[in-house]
Amino acid sequence: MRLQGRSIGSGKVAGEALVTTMSVSFFGGIDPETGIVVERGHELEGQCIAGKIFVFPTGIGSTVGSYTLYRLKKAGKSPLAIINTECEPITAVGCIISGIPCVDQIPISNILTGALVIVDGEQGSVETHTHSTYAQSQGEEK
């Protein structure tokens, strides 16, 4: 499925989606050394965002969250890309300064954890695939 949104941060990547319906605070909610969600009561508490396409409605919290995204990138623990329903300035600045592709204005309910997702930050588009449909589109066997 191809979804058209708005480009926030450039770059094109593919990876596995990690999806939450809860807003995310990078400052205090994500450990910048490990990429693990540490916010108590968050539905992703204990899970790692590193190397994932991180999908969440919007960011919340302190402007230090932009720098936290940068720290995650420098530590090799950042998400591959971010997809939002509405990207607010904290997440946008963090993605831009860290070189993390980001697209918003996407109906995130169409993306499931574990799905293969291709994020094109240049075009502002997102493609979702099951692993088998992606393999078929690439001419590979199931």
Image (spheres, helix red, strand yellow):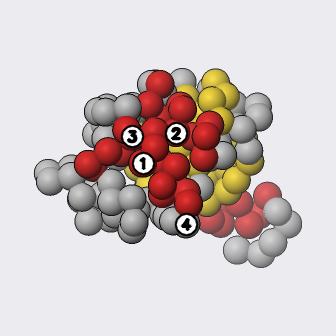
Q: Give the alpha-carbon distance from disc 4 to disc 3, as whole Å.
A: 17 Å
Q: Which residue is mark 4?
A: 76
Mark 2 residue type: Gly
Mark positioned earlier in the residue sequence (4 or 1): 1
Amino acid type of the residue that numbered disc 4 sits on in the rendered structure: Gly
Drawn side of residue 11 relative to residue 69, left or right: right
Closer to the chain start, of discs 2 and 4, is 4
Q: Residue at x 27, y 49 (%)?
A: 29
In screen coordinates, is 5 left or right of 89? right
Helix, strand or loop at mark 2 = helix
Asked which secondary structure carries label 3, the reply is helix
Residue that carries the numbered disc 1 in the rendered image: 68
| The image quarter in which residue 30 lies | bottom left
Label 1 CA crowd tier, 10 Å (few <14, some 14–19, many 20+): many
**Residue named by callout 2:** 94
Give the CA distance from mark 1 to mark 2: 8 Å
- Front-most of 40 and 111? 40
* Pointer 2 local density, CA inside 10 Å: few below 14, some 14–19, many at least 20: many
Picture residue at 51% right of the left edge, 65% below the top: 75
Determine whether label 1 and label 3 are within 8 Å by CB.
yes
Q: Are marks 3 and 2 in contact (CB under 8 Å)?
A: yes
Choose top left, top right, bottom left or bottom right for residue 96. Answer: top right
**Element marked by disc 4:** loop
